[in-house]
Image: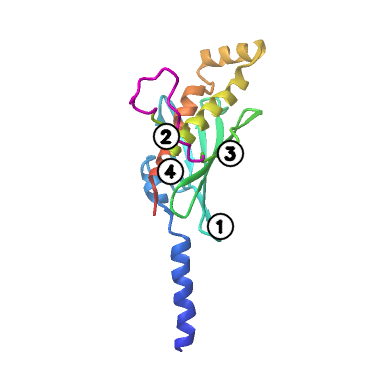
Amino acid sequence: MKTSIIPLLTALALSSTAFAVSFDTEAFGARLNGWRKDRTAVYSFTDAKYRTHTPTVSYSPTGTLFLSTQVDMLSIAGKGAICQIGLTLSPAGVLEGIQIKGTIGSKSLDTGLIRRPDAPAAAAPAEGAAEGAAPVRRLNPTDEMITELFVRFDSEMKKFTEGKEAFRSDLISRMSGNNVKSADLSAGLRHNVNLMLQNVSR
């Protein structure tokens, strides 16, 4: 009997170590107006309406957490945006990768995978800088990743307003109030990213 219990206890110990990082799906939903029966949350943010789907959570054999969710920007005409946010977190809960993919009408966008930056080497003092001057402060690596993510996202969104015909179409949709505004969509997605990270625990 003892020999059968030992492997079980060992397996439990290993699994708790491997999956030390976790995500609180219910708390995340509560921050987005609560999960409905269809396991989506519908809410307003920055003058736009959104629908976030319950995140998918999976683990690698080594305990890396893969977290993804779909965020829909809703519009009166039904021509909103559908975006997928994907996060990769180490077993210690450190953000290692983040990406946004999406479609707006017939066009698609992809920020590409943003990876965690390597630790920077000690910066040499700038030429002409006063001796003893405070070193330039860098953003936290996670903040750097999120900043880079939305710089790329905004660049991708420019594709939707390129050319005279696109500009004319965008102008008409703005007048009718049915367009997907880049600033609103960016803010809504950033809100989801922030809440997802706030509900990761170790």
The residue located at (55%, 25%) in the rendering is 77
Residue 34: x, y in percent? 38, 44
Q: CA distance from mark 1 to mark 4?
A: 19 Å
Label 4 or label 3, whichever lies nearer to me, is 3
How far apart marks 1 and 2 lie (CA) works out to 26 Å
Does the segment drawn in magenta span residue 135?
yes
Nearer the camera: disc 2 or disc 3: 3
Q: CA distance from mark 2 to mark 3?
A: 19 Å
Q: Earlier in the sequence, mark 4 or mark 3?
A: 3
Q: Amino acid at mark 3?
A: Leu
Is disc 2 in contact with disc 4, using a CB cutoff of under 8 Å?
no
Residue 85 visible (yes or no): no
- Examine the image and state in which quarter residue 188 appears: top left
Q: Which residue range is magenta in the image?
A: 118-136
- Percent from the top left, x then y, of residue 155? 57, 24
Distance, label 2 to label 4, CA atoms, is 9 Å
Amino acid type, callout 1: Ser
Q: Relative to 148, is 12 above or below?
A: below
Q: Quarter of the image for the C terminus: give it.
A: bottom left
Would you name the residue on which mark 2 appears?
A: 191
Earlier-in-chain disc, 1 versus 4: 1
* Residue position marked by numbered label 3 in the rendering: 113
Instruction: Report the residue marked by disc 1.
Output: 60
- Would residue 139 be counted in the magenta stretch? no
